[in-house]
Each structure stands twice: as structure tokens, then as C-alpha cells.
Image (cartoon, grey):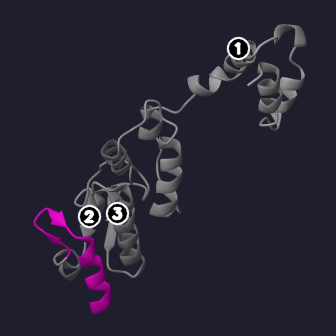
Amino acid sequence: MDEKLLMHLFQDGFAGAAVAWYTNLEVSQIQSWKDLTTAIIRQYQYNTDMAPDRNQLQSMTKREHESIKEYAQRWRDLAAQVVPPMIEREMITIMVDMLPTFHYEKMIVYMSANFADLIFAGERIESRLRKGKFEYASNVAPNNNRRAPMVVSYPNFFWGPLFDGMQPSLDRFEELDTHH
């Protein structure tokens, strides 16, 4: 393909600030496709340089009135931008570690290898919490991520049938819903 045509077609993909940047380029500096790609990389390299990293994910906490699903979506959106990309297991471990104490204590038992299943389990826990199946009090703010001593009580009929040893089953969540 002709370089001039390629350069002309490529500009059609620009929007917003990129259009203004492209329009203000000095024509004398852009004589070839290579010149254009070099200019683009120079202009937008900061996007790569400013990409989120694992440290940012490890400081991203669940907001007080945010559901586990909303938090996971916000967290996963940021995780998708981390360079180099994270594997699923690493994402699960970091996200669960950042949950508030109450959620952490419930989710750490589950630790699925699948992010979606983990979030489903978190939603079930939140549902049970809203229905009064858990009672808890804390000497720290409810969304605090410190692992401070916490008084937690929960009915054995809820957690007992959920987990057989250390291998919890999501099917057991459904069984509870149909029996209560």
C-alpha cells in the first residue's frame, strides 16, 4: 500500500485531543509512515509510562457502600492495564488481600482459581449479610483493610454446609437458597 494513502487513512482513526495533535504536526517533519509512527510513539509514550502497576492495585480498597461486584469491576479494569499482564491467580490473590476485614475473612476460605466464581461467592456473602445471616462488630471502621481483631459470629447452618474441608462448592450456595 502507498505510504501517503496509509498515512491519510490512519488519521481517520484519531479522535478528540489526538485530532488536534495530528492537525498541528509540522508537515515538513512527517514525510513517511515511519516519521508518523515515530511521532505518535513519542507523543503518547506517557500512556505506557503511566500504566498502572501492581502497587496501585495493592492500595486500591473497596469503598464503604460499594458492592463486591462494583469493586471487582473497578479493580479488574485497572488490573487489565497493568504491564506486564497479570495471570488470573495473581489477580485473585491481590484483590482478596485488599478486601475489608469482614469480606477477607469470608473470601479467603474460598479462593477460587476463577475470578468470576470468586465474585459470585462474594455476592452470595453480601446477600447473606443483607439478610441478617451474619452479625459482626469491629473496633475499626467497617471498610478498614487492617487485619485488626474482630468479633464475628455466623450461624453454623450457613458456613457448615458450604464448605467440605477446604474445597468450597458454589453449588452449595444454591442449595442454601432453596432450603431457606
Task: Please tell me whether residue 46 is drawn above or below residue 30 in the rendered image.
Answer: below
Q: Quadrant of the N terminus?
A: top right
Q: Is residue 88 left or right of residue 81?
A: left
Residue 32 shows up from this direction: yes
Give the mark, 3 or 2, whose residue is nearer the N terminus: 3
**Residue corresponding to mark 1:** 34
Residue at 32% from the left image edge and 42% from the top image edge = 90
Q: Is residue 142 part of the magenta span, yes or no?
A: no
Q: Residues within 10 Å of mark 1 (few under 14, many from 20)?
A: few
Q: Is residue 63 left or right of residue 152?
A: right
From the top left corner, tell me how far across and down residue 83 is, in percent.
Answer: 47, 30
Mark 3 or 1: in front is 1
Residue at 32% from the left image edge and 75% from the top image edge = 134
Cα separation, mark 3 vs mark 1, equals 46 Å
Give the mark, 3 or 1, whose residue is nearer the N terminus: 1
Q: Which residues are magenta?
A: 162-180
Q: Quadrant of the C terminus?
A: bottom left
Quarter of the image where one finds residue 31? top right
Residue type for callout 3: Asp
Q: Which mark is residue 151?
A: 2
Q: Is residue 164 part of the magenta span, yes or no?
A: yes
Task: Please tell me whether residue 41 is drawn above or below residue 112 in the rendered image.
Answer: above
**Element marked by disc 3:** helix
Q: Residues within 10 Å of mark 3 (few under 14, many from 20)?
A: some
From the top left corner, tell me how far across and down residue 168 is, in percent.
Answer: 20, 67
**Element marked by disc 1:** helix
